[in-house]
Amino acid sequence: MLQLGSTVQKMAYVSPKEIALIVGVVTACYWNSLFCGFVFDDVSAILDNKDLHPSTPLKNLFLNDFWGTPMSEERSHKSYRPLTVLTFRLNYLFSELNAVSYHLLNIIFHTVVCIVFLKVCKLFLDSRSSVVASLLFAVHPIHTEAVTGVVGRAELLSSIFFLTAFLSYTRSKGPENTIVWTPIALTVFLVAVATLCKEQGITVVGICCVYEVFMAQGYTLPILWDTVLQILQGKGSIPYCMLQMLLKLIVLMFSTLLLVVIRVQVIQSQLPVFTRFDNPAAVSPAPARQLTFNYLLPVNAWLLLNPSELCCDWTMGTIPLVETLLDLLMYMKENIQLVSRPSKLSTVEFSVSLLVIEYLIYS
Protein backbone atom coordinates (compact mmCIF):
# COMPACT_ATOMS: atom_id res chain seq x y z
CA MET A 1 0.00 0.00 0.00
CA LEU A 2 1.17 3.52 -0.73
CA GLN A 3 2.86 5.19 2.21
CA LEU A 4 1.44 8.58 3.06
CA GLY A 5 2.30 11.56 5.26
CA SER A 6 5.97 12.45 5.40
CA THR A 7 6.84 9.48 3.18
CA VAL A 8 4.63 10.85 0.42
CA GLN A 9 6.28 14.26 0.69
CA LYS A 10 9.72 12.64 0.48
CA MET A 11 8.73 10.59 -2.57
CA ALA A 12 7.28 13.66 -4.29
CA TYR A 13 10.42 15.76 -3.81
CA VAL A 14 11.75 17.21 -7.06
CA SER A 15 15.42 18.13 -7.11
CA PRO A 16 16.83 21.30 -8.71
CA LYS A 17 18.62 19.15 -11.31
CA GLU A 18 15.33 17.55 -12.33
CA ILE A 19 13.67 20.97 -12.59
CA ALA A 20 16.56 22.27 -14.70
CA LEU A 21 16.31 19.23 -16.98
CA ILE A 22 12.58 19.79 -17.55
CA VAL A 23 13.10 23.52 -18.15
CA GLY A 24 15.79 22.77 -20.72
CA VAL A 25 13.76 20.15 -22.56
CA VAL A 26 10.59 22.28 -22.68
CA THR A 27 12.55 25.31 -23.84
CA ALA A 28 14.30 23.34 -26.58
CA CYS A 29 11.01 21.86 -27.73
CA TYR A 30 8.85 25.00 -27.74
CA TRP A 31 11.16 28.01 -28.13
CA ASN A 32 10.09 28.40 -31.77
CA SER A 33 6.48 28.93 -30.66
CA LEU A 34 7.51 32.37 -29.39
CA PHE A 35 7.25 33.64 -32.96
CA CYS A 36 3.92 32.08 -33.88
CA GLY A 37 1.76 35.19 -33.47
CA PHE A 38 -1.99 34.91 -32.93
CA VAL A 39 -3.88 32.28 -34.92
CA PHE A 40 -7.36 30.77 -35.11
CA ASP A 41 -9.21 31.16 -31.77
CA ASP A 42 -6.50 33.54 -30.48
CA VAL A 43 -8.09 36.22 -32.65
CA SER A 44 -11.47 36.02 -30.88
CA ALA A 45 -10.11 35.41 -27.39
CA ILE A 46 -7.38 38.07 -27.46
CA LEU A 47 -7.38 40.47 -30.40
CA ASP A 48 -11.17 41.00 -30.36
CA ASN A 49 -11.73 40.57 -26.63
CA LYS A 50 -12.38 43.90 -24.89
CA ASP A 51 -12.05 42.26 -21.46
CA LEU A 52 -8.27 42.43 -21.86
CA HIS A 53 -8.25 46.22 -22.01
CA PRO A 54 -7.50 48.16 -18.80
CA SER A 55 -10.47 50.42 -19.55
CA THR A 56 -12.85 47.47 -19.11
CA PRO A 57 -14.01 46.97 -15.50
CA LEU A 58 -12.33 43.96 -13.90
CA LYS A 59 -15.72 42.59 -12.82
CA ASN A 60 -16.59 42.00 -16.47
CA LEU A 61 -14.18 39.06 -16.50
CA PHE A 62 -16.55 37.30 -14.10
CA LEU A 63 -19.68 38.28 -16.03
CA ASN A 64 -18.54 37.37 -19.54
CA ASP A 65 -17.48 34.14 -21.18
CA PHE A 66 -14.03 33.22 -22.46
CA TRP A 67 -14.58 35.28 -25.62
CA GLY A 68 -15.84 38.44 -23.93
CA THR A 69 -19.54 37.81 -24.58
CA PRO A 70 -21.91 38.36 -21.62
CA MET A 71 -23.00 35.03 -20.14
CA SER A 72 -26.59 36.26 -20.16
CA GLU A 73 -26.70 36.44 -23.95
CA GLU A 74 -27.99 33.49 -25.93
CA ARG A 75 -25.04 33.64 -28.34
CA SER A 76 -22.60 33.13 -25.45
CA HIS A 77 -20.41 30.05 -25.74
CA LYS A 78 -20.90 29.51 -21.96
CA SER A 79 -17.16 28.88 -21.54
CA TYR A 80 -16.64 30.43 -18.11
CA ARG A 81 -12.87 30.76 -17.59
CA PRO A 82 -12.31 34.12 -15.84
CA LEU A 83 -8.93 33.22 -14.32
CA THR A 84 -7.51 32.35 -17.73
CA VAL A 85 -8.80 35.62 -19.17
CA LEU A 86 -7.22 37.39 -16.18
CA THR A 87 -3.78 36.10 -17.24
CA PHE A 88 -4.45 37.40 -20.78
CA ARG A 89 -5.26 40.74 -19.26
CA LEU A 90 -1.98 40.74 -17.34
CA ASN A 91 -0.16 40.03 -20.61
CA TYR A 92 -1.95 42.95 -22.22
CA LEU A 93 -1.08 45.19 -19.27
CA PHE A 94 2.66 44.61 -19.74
CA SER A 95 2.96 44.13 -23.50
CA GLU A 96 -0.45 44.88 -25.01
CA LEU A 97 -0.74 42.68 -28.14
CA ASN A 98 2.87 41.56 -28.42
CA ALA A 99 2.33 37.85 -29.10
CA VAL A 100 5.80 36.86 -27.85
CA SER A 101 4.91 37.57 -24.21
CA TYR A 102 1.72 35.48 -24.49
CA HIS A 103 3.59 32.51 -25.92
CA LEU A 104 6.38 32.88 -23.37
CA LEU A 105 3.91 32.65 -20.51
CA ASN A 106 2.38 29.55 -22.08
CA ILE A 107 5.80 27.89 -22.17
CA ILE A 108 6.34 28.78 -18.50
CA PHE A 109 2.97 27.32 -17.55
CA HIS A 110 3.72 24.12 -19.50
CA THR A 111 7.00 23.83 -17.62
CA VAL A 112 5.14 24.15 -14.31
CA VAL A 113 2.66 21.46 -15.41
CA CYS A 114 5.54 19.09 -16.21
CA ILE A 115 7.20 19.69 -12.84
CA VAL A 116 3.97 19.08 -10.94
CA PHE A 117 3.35 16.02 -13.11
CA LEU A 118 6.78 14.75 -12.04
CA LYS A 119 5.74 15.12 -8.40
CA VAL A 120 2.62 13.06 -9.09
CA CYS A 121 4.65 10.38 -10.87
CA LYS A 122 6.96 10.06 -7.89
CA LEU A 123 4.01 8.97 -5.76
CA PHE A 124 3.73 5.78 -7.82
CA LEU A 125 7.05 5.25 -9.62
CA ASP A 126 10.74 5.26 -8.79
CA SER A 127 12.68 8.46 -9.39
CA ARG A 128 14.22 7.50 -12.75
CA SER A 129 10.93 6.25 -14.22
CA SER A 130 9.20 9.40 -12.98
CA VAL A 131 11.71 11.64 -14.73
CA VAL A 132 11.36 9.68 -17.97
CA ALA A 133 7.56 9.89 -17.73
CA SER A 134 7.63 13.64 -17.12
CA LEU A 135 10.01 14.21 -20.04
CA LEU A 136 7.76 12.18 -22.34
CA PHE A 137 4.84 14.25 -21.08
CA ALA A 138 6.79 17.44 -21.76
CA VAL A 139 7.55 16.62 -25.39
CA HIS A 140 4.44 14.63 -26.34
CA PRO A 141 3.18 16.11 -29.63
CA ILE A 142 -0.44 15.99 -28.49
CA HIS A 143 0.29 18.95 -26.19
CA THR A 144 1.40 21.14 -29.08
CA GLU A 145 -2.01 22.77 -29.50
CA ALA A 146 -2.28 23.64 -25.81
CA VAL A 147 1.22 25.15 -25.62
CA THR A 148 1.62 26.91 -28.97
CA GLY A 149 -1.96 28.18 -29.24
CA VAL A 150 -2.39 31.03 -26.78
CA VAL A 151 -5.98 30.00 -26.00
CA GLY A 152 -4.53 26.65 -24.95
CA ARG A 153 -3.51 28.39 -21.74
CA ALA A 154 -6.89 27.34 -20.34
CA GLU A 155 -5.73 23.70 -20.47
CA LEU A 156 -2.33 24.55 -19.00
CA LEU A 157 -3.72 26.48 -16.04
CA SER A 158 -6.43 23.92 -15.39
CA SER A 159 -3.82 21.15 -15.46
CA ILE A 160 -1.64 22.91 -12.89
CA PHE A 161 -4.47 23.17 -10.38
CA PHE A 162 -5.84 19.74 -11.34
CA LEU A 163 -2.54 18.07 -10.43
CA THR A 164 -1.92 20.15 -7.30
CA ALA A 165 -5.45 19.36 -6.10
CA PHE A 166 -4.67 15.66 -6.43
CA LEU A 167 -1.32 16.07 -4.69
CA SER A 168 -3.07 17.85 -1.85
CA TYR A 169 -5.61 15.06 -1.50
CA THR A 170 -2.89 12.40 -1.19
CA ARG A 171 -1.93 14.05 2.11
CA SER A 172 -5.41 13.73 3.61
CA LYS A 173 -4.76 10.35 5.26
CA GLY A 174 -3.19 10.61 8.69
CA PRO A 175 -1.82 8.00 11.13
CA GLU A 176 -4.14 5.04 11.83
CA ASN A 177 -6.43 6.07 8.99
CA THR A 178 -7.40 9.38 10.55
CA ILE A 179 -8.58 12.24 8.36
CA VAL A 180 -6.44 15.33 7.85
CA TRP A 181 -8.95 17.99 6.89
CA THR A 182 -6.62 20.79 5.81
CA PRO A 183 -5.47 19.00 2.62
CA ILE A 184 -9.11 18.19 1.79
CA ALA A 185 -10.14 21.83 2.19
CA LEU A 186 -7.19 22.85 0.01
CA THR A 187 -8.20 20.22 -2.56
CA VAL A 188 -11.73 21.64 -2.80
CA PHE A 189 -10.32 25.15 -3.23
CA LEU A 190 -7.89 24.02 -5.93
CA VAL A 191 -10.68 22.15 -7.75
CA ALA A 192 -12.69 25.39 -7.83
CA VAL A 193 -9.69 27.31 -9.17
CA ALA A 194 -9.00 24.64 -11.82
CA THR A 195 -12.64 24.83 -12.92
CA LEU A 196 -12.41 28.61 -13.24
CA CYS A 197 -9.50 28.07 -15.64
CA LYS A 198 -11.27 25.44 -17.71
CA GLU A 199 -14.31 23.30 -17.05
CA GLN A 200 -12.70 19.86 -16.95
CA GLY A 201 -10.79 20.83 -13.82
CA ILE A 202 -13.69 19.48 -11.79
CA THR A 203 -12.96 15.93 -12.98
CA VAL A 204 -10.05 15.65 -10.55
CA VAL A 205 -12.67 14.80 -7.93
CA GLY A 206 -13.25 11.49 -9.72
CA ILE A 207 -9.52 10.81 -9.67
CA CYS A 208 -9.39 11.51 -5.94
CA CYS A 209 -12.27 9.09 -5.34
CA VAL A 210 -10.55 6.30 -7.29
CA TYR A 211 -7.30 7.00 -5.44
CA GLU A 212 -9.00 6.95 -2.04
CA VAL A 213 -10.77 3.62 -2.57
CA PHE A 214 -8.17 1.61 -4.43
CA MET A 215 -4.84 3.19 -3.52
CA ALA A 216 -5.10 4.85 -0.10
CA GLN A 217 -7.43 2.19 1.37
CA GLY A 218 -6.09 -0.66 -0.74
CA TYR A 219 -9.47 -2.13 -1.68
CA THR A 220 -9.99 -4.43 -4.65
CA LEU A 221 -13.34 -4.76 -6.39
CA PRO A 222 -14.02 -8.27 -4.97
CA ILE A 223 -13.11 -7.24 -1.41
CA LEU A 224 -15.16 -4.07 -1.67
CA TRP A 225 -18.14 -6.01 -3.03
CA ASP A 226 -17.90 -8.67 -0.30
CA THR A 227 -17.68 -6.03 2.42
CA VAL A 228 -20.74 -4.19 1.12
CA LEU A 229 -22.72 -7.46 0.86
CA GLN A 230 -21.89 -8.42 4.44
CA ILE A 231 -23.00 -5.02 5.69
CA LEU A 232 -26.27 -5.16 3.73
CA GLN A 233 -26.97 -8.68 5.01
CA GLY A 234 -26.36 -7.60 8.59
CA LYS A 235 -23.39 -9.92 9.03
CA GLY A 236 -21.04 -7.20 10.11
CA SER A 237 -20.66 -3.53 10.91
CA ILE A 238 -19.04 -0.93 8.73
CA PRO A 239 -15.26 -0.99 9.31
CA TYR A 240 -13.72 2.16 10.77
CA CYS A 241 -11.51 2.65 7.72
CA MET A 242 -14.55 2.46 5.45
CA LEU A 243 -16.41 5.02 7.58
CA GLN A 244 -13.48 7.39 7.25
CA MET A 245 -13.33 6.74 3.53
CA LEU A 246 -17.07 7.35 3.09
CA LEU A 247 -16.88 10.59 5.06
CA LYS A 248 -14.11 11.91 2.83
CA LEU A 249 -15.93 10.87 -0.33
CA ILE A 250 -19.17 12.50 0.84
CA VAL A 251 -17.33 15.77 1.48
CA LEU A 252 -15.75 15.59 -1.98
CA MET A 253 -19.02 14.79 -3.74
CA PHE A 254 -20.97 17.46 -1.85
CA SER A 255 -18.33 20.04 -2.74
CA THR A 256 -18.47 18.95 -6.37
CA LEU A 257 -22.26 19.22 -6.39
CA LEU A 258 -22.00 22.72 -4.97
CA LEU A 259 -19.54 23.72 -7.71
CA VAL A 260 -21.87 22.29 -10.35
CA VAL A 261 -24.82 24.24 -8.94
CA ILE A 262 -22.80 27.44 -8.98
CA ARG A 263 -21.69 26.71 -12.52
CA VAL A 264 -25.29 26.19 -13.63
CA GLN A 265 -26.24 29.50 -12.03
CA VAL A 266 -23.39 31.26 -13.82
CA ILE A 267 -24.53 30.03 -17.24
CA GLN A 268 -28.11 30.87 -16.18
CA SER A 269 -29.26 27.29 -16.77
CA GLN A 270 -28.66 27.63 -20.50
CA LEU A 271 -26.63 25.22 -22.60
CA PRO A 272 -24.33 26.61 -25.30
CA VAL A 273 -25.70 26.65 -28.83
CA PHE A 274 -23.30 25.00 -31.29
CA THR A 275 -23.48 25.43 -35.04
CA ARG A 276 -22.74 22.71 -37.57
CA PHE A 277 -19.52 24.58 -38.36
CA ASP A 278 -18.32 24.43 -34.73
CA ASN A 279 -19.42 20.92 -33.85
CA PRO A 280 -21.23 18.84 -36.49
CA ALA A 281 -21.83 15.93 -34.12
CA ALA A 282 -23.52 18.11 -31.50
CA VAL A 283 -26.28 19.17 -33.90
CA SER A 284 -26.67 15.80 -35.64
CA PRO A 285 -29.73 13.59 -35.04
CA ALA A 286 -29.62 10.16 -33.42
CA PRO A 287 -27.89 7.80 -33.86
CA ALA A 288 -25.15 9.80 -35.63
CA ARG A 289 -24.63 12.01 -32.57
CA GLN A 290 -24.18 9.07 -30.16
CA LEU A 291 -22.07 7.00 -32.57
CA THR A 292 -19.74 9.90 -33.34
CA PHE A 293 -19.23 10.85 -29.69
CA ASN A 294 -18.41 7.23 -28.83
CA TYR A 295 -16.06 7.05 -31.81
CA LEU A 296 -14.10 9.95 -30.30
CA LEU A 297 -13.01 7.69 -27.42
CA PRO A 298 -10.74 5.41 -29.48
CA VAL A 299 -9.71 8.34 -31.69
CA ASN A 300 -8.28 10.23 -28.73
CA ALA A 301 -6.76 7.08 -27.25
CA TRP A 302 -5.02 6.40 -30.58
CA LEU A 303 -3.67 9.96 -30.71
CA LEU A 304 -1.96 9.35 -27.36
CA LEU A 305 -0.17 6.34 -28.84
CA ASN A 306 0.34 7.62 -32.38
CA PRO A 307 0.10 11.43 -32.56
CA SER A 308 0.88 11.57 -36.26
CA GLU A 309 -2.36 13.17 -37.44
CA LEU A 310 -2.89 16.19 -35.22
CA CYS A 311 -5.03 19.19 -36.07
CA CYS A 312 -4.83 22.82 -35.01
CA ASP A 313 -8.61 23.28 -35.12
CA TRP A 314 -10.98 20.36 -34.52
CA THR A 315 -14.05 22.03 -36.04
CA MET A 316 -16.10 21.45 -39.18
CA GLY A 317 -15.62 17.95 -40.61
CA THR A 318 -12.19 17.28 -39.14
CA ILE A 319 -13.53 14.01 -37.74
CA PRO A 320 -16.15 12.50 -40.05
CA LEU A 321 -19.63 11.82 -38.71
CA VAL A 322 -20.40 8.21 -37.88
CA GLU A 323 -23.94 7.79 -39.18
CA THR A 324 -24.29 4.00 -39.17
CA LEU A 325 -22.69 1.01 -37.48
CA LEU A 326 -21.09 0.19 -40.82
CA ASP A 327 -19.30 3.56 -40.70
CA LEU A 328 -18.11 2.75 -37.21
CA LEU A 329 -16.65 -0.57 -38.31
CA MET A 330 -14.90 1.12 -41.20
CA TYR A 331 -13.39 3.88 -39.05
CA MET A 332 -12.36 1.72 -36.14
CA LYS A 333 -8.81 0.42 -36.57
CA GLU A 334 -8.15 -0.68 -33.05
CA ASN A 335 -10.33 -2.43 -30.48
CA ILE A 336 -9.67 -1.67 -26.84
CA GLN A 337 -10.57 -4.47 -24.44
CA LEU A 338 -10.68 -3.91 -20.69
CA VAL A 339 -10.25 -7.10 -18.71
CA SER A 340 -11.15 -6.91 -15.03
CA ARG A 341 -9.27 -9.21 -12.70
CA PRO A 342 -9.45 -9.67 -8.91
CA SER A 343 -6.20 -7.94 -7.99
CA LYS A 344 -5.10 -4.74 -6.39
CA LEU A 345 -5.26 -1.66 -8.61
CA SER A 346 -1.82 -1.24 -10.14
CA THR A 347 -0.10 2.00 -11.05
CA VAL A 348 -0.82 1.40 -14.74
CA GLU A 349 -4.52 0.72 -14.07
CA PHE A 350 -4.80 3.81 -11.89
CA SER A 351 -3.19 5.89 -14.66
CA VAL A 352 -5.68 4.50 -17.19
CA SER A 353 -8.58 5.29 -14.85
CA LEU A 354 -7.29 8.87 -14.58
CA LEU A 355 -7.50 9.25 -18.36
CA VAL A 356 -10.87 7.52 -18.68
CA ILE A 357 -12.62 9.34 -15.84
CA GLU A 358 -11.50 12.77 -16.98
CA TYR A 359 -12.52 12.06 -20.58
CA LEU A 360 -15.92 10.58 -19.71
CA ILE A 361 -16.91 13.33 -17.31
CA TYR A 362 -15.83 16.13 -19.61
CA SER A 363 -17.13 14.75 -22.91
Image (spheres, grey):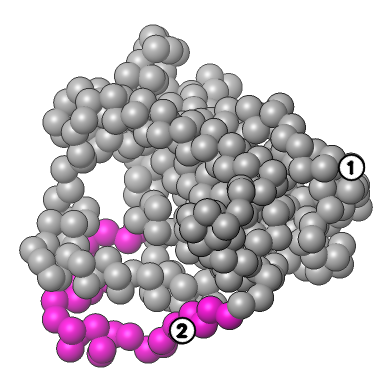
Q: Is residue 270 visible?
A: yes
Seen at 59% across and 37% down, the residue is 247
Find out whether residue 322 is within the magenta segment.
Answer: yes
Q: Quadrant of the N terminus?
A: bottom right
Q: Earlier in the sequence, mark 2 or mark 1?
A: 1
Q: Farthest front residue?
A: 235
Pointer 2 residue: 337
Where residue 81 sits: x, y (%)?
A: 41, 32
Please state which of residues 362 and 15 is positioned toward the viewer in this rendering: 362
What residue appears at the point 81 percent right and 69 percent down from the top-left corner?
A: 129
Q: Which mark is residue 289?
A: none
The stretch in magenta equals 313-341
Q: Secondary structure at mark 1?
A: helix
Crowding near pointer 1: few (<14 within 10 Å), some, many (20+)? few
Give the numbered dot on residue 6.
1
Name the residue: 65% across, 33% down: 184
Q: Quadrant of residue 45?
A: top left
Image position of 145 (left or right of 173):
left
- Mark 2 secondary-structure assignment: loop
- Residue 335: within the magenta? yes
Residue at the far left: name it.
285
The image position of residue 332, as x and y in percent, is 33, 85
Where residue 304 appears, x then y in whole percent?
Answer: 52, 72
Asked if one can make out residue 48 in the rendered structure from this viewpoint, the answer is: no
The amino acid at mark 2 is Gln
The crowding category of the residue bearing disc 2, from other C-alpha atoms within 10 Å (few below 14, some 14 to 19, many at least 20), is few
